[in-house]
Amino acid sequence: MHVQDMIDRQTSTATGAMQLRTDEKFGNEQMMCVLSGYWSLVSFWEDVRKKPLEVQCADACNKEAHAKCVATWEKRWNSAVGWKRILGHNSADVLALLACLRDQLSGDDELREGVAPACRLAGLKALNDKLEHTREHLVDYFLAVYEGTAC
Ligand SMILES: [Zn+2]
C-alpha cells in the first residue's frame, strides 16, 4: 500500500527523470524499508517475466510429447508478459501481475491447443501457487537491513 502510494506521488523533471518524493510521515529508516520493498518486488517481477515457470510433465503426457508442451508454454508465457494488460500494472504490483498473467494464460487458446490438458493445468496451478506463496510472504520483501538493524 505504501509502495503504491509512493508511486502515485512521484513527479518527473522536464528531462523525464523521476524526482523521488517521500511521504513526510516516514523517517529515513522506514523510507529505506519502503524503497527496498519496491526494489525487491520489481526485481522479483523481472525474474518471473524472463524465466517462465517450469511446467511439470503430467502422468497423462510423456517425455517426447512434453517437449512440445514446454515449448508452447514458454512461448505463450513470453508473449503474455508483454501484453497491454500486464504492461498496465506497475512492476512492483507483483500480486496483480501474477494474477493477470494467470488469467491471461488460463484463457489462452494457443496454450489450450499446444499443451496437453493435464500439463496445462499443472502449469496454471504452479503459477497460482506462486501467487499464493508470494501473497503469504509479501512482508519478506520489505526486510531491509539498514545500518545493521533490520526493519
Ligand atoms: Zn506435457
Image (cartoon, rainbow, N blue to C red):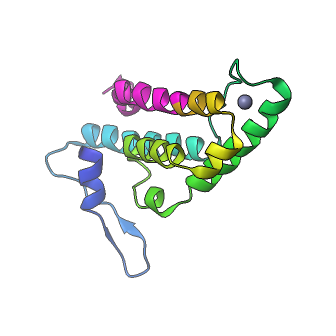
Q: Is residue 1 visible?
A: yes
Q: Is residue 129 magenta?
A: yes
x, y percent for residue 14? 38, 82
38 or 85: which is nearer to us? 85
Residue in the picture at 57% in, 41% down? 48
Q: Main secondary structure of the magenta part?
A: helix
The quadrant in which residue 35 appears is: top left
x, y percent for residue 107? 50, 48
75 or 37: which is nearer to us? 75
Quadrant position of ligand 1: top right
Q: Is residue 33 magenta?
A: no
* Rendered-image quadrant of the N terminus: top left
Q: Is residue 146 visible?
A: no
* Rendered-image quadrant of the C terminus: top left
Task: Determine whether, in the image, residue 127 is placed left or right of residue 16.
Answer: right
The quadrant in which residue 61 appears is: top right
115 over 56 or under it: above or below: below
The quadrant in which residue 36 appears is: top left
Residue in the picture at 54% in, 34% down? 124
Task: Determine whether, in the image, residue 10 is placed left or right of residue 126.
Answer: left
x, y percent for residue 8? 26, 60
The magenta-colored residue range is: 125-151
The residue sitting at the bottom extreme is 14
